[in-house]
Image (tube, helix red, strand yellow):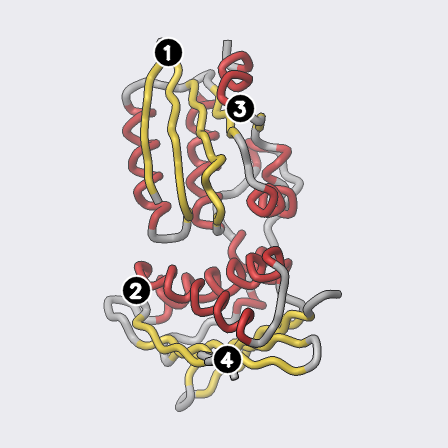
Amino acid sequence: MELDFKTKRDLGLVIVKGKIDANTALDLESRLNSIISDKKFKLIIDMKDVDFISSAGLRVLLAGLKETKKNDGELVLVGLQPQVKEVFDITGFTSLFKCCSNVKDAEKMLK
Amino acid sequence: MEDQKLHLEVASKLENLPEVRDFIADAMKSLGFGSEKEIFEVQVAVDEACTNIMKHAYPGTAGPIIIDCSGSGNEFKIIIRDKGKSFDPKSVPEPDTKAPLEKRKIGGLGIFLMKAYIDKLDYTFDADAGNELTMIKYIGK
């Protein structure tokens, strides 16, 4: 899994590529924690190049969503691939997260 | 005849999860089983089962996980064995997947995904043989 992070004004953009399993989710978790502790509460996670996610990844995303919401922020997911989307659908995560197909739309949602 | 690798033994370390997922994909393909979607679903289920073993079965050590695959008709069977602590995934209560965010608990989703993507799940524990989890996926249903 690869991780990249960019900021744009008060927005944080996390770009994730590859597979989020119980091992790589630890890296994503520590990155999200450090971004949130820097008081960035409006986050976009670009997942268009994520082709695998297990429950460990879901847990990290859910914890991130709860933390941003607690601080009047939001966490928007971008570009879920069909099989990843299916994992979100069957676990009920689709109704918890705001999702869109590209980063521009996500930025609009967070304005 | 295509070279079939249907047996894998790995140490129970989280960094071995990619090897487990690749093994599942290769085994299904060599048996002529499964669309990309079905392969993904079995990979998720086996990844979750092995993650549980890696996290809970061998505290403080990395014992072996042994995986055997076989195919018959439209049935793809995976048997996962370990000699760690006993753990029946069927005993874990289901998460409430309809709960709103504030009531949504973090956890319990691994077993839920395993059950969602696998058609038959069977677990046995024997003091000598250890844990044995059998998963069956009906292909092309």
Q: Residues within 10 Å of mark 2 (few under 14, many from 20)?
A: some
Point out residue A93 in the picture as x, y percentages from the top left corner. Answer: 59, 39
Contact? badges 3 and 2 (CB < 8 Å):
no
Question: Spatial distance from mark 3 to mark 2, Cα to Cα?
Answer: 35 Å
- Chain letter behind tag 1: A
- Chain letter behind tag 2: B
Three-letter code, disc 4: Glu
Question: Which residue carries the number 1 mark?
Answer: A10
Q: Secondary structure at mark 1?
A: loop
Question: Spatial distance from mark 4 to mark 3, Cα to Cα?
Answer: 42 Å
Question: Which residue carries the number 4 mark?
Answer: B2
The quarter of the image holding the C terminus of chain B is bottom right
Same subunit, labels 2 and 1: the answer reads no
- Chain letter behind tag 4: B
Three-letter code, disc 3: Asn
Quadrant of the image occupied by residue B114: bottom right
Q: Which mark is residue A102?
A: 3
Question: Which residue carries the number 2 mark?
Answer: B13
Question: Spatial distance from mark 2 to mark 1, Cα to Cα?
Answer: 38 Å
Residue B28 in view: yes
Tell me: residue A25, above or below residue B77: above
Contact? badges 1 and 4 (CB < 8 Å):
no
Q: Residue at x 57, y 61 (%)?
A: B39
Contact? badges 2 and 4 (CB < 8 Å):
no
Comparing labels 3 and 2, the label whose residue is closer to the camera: 3
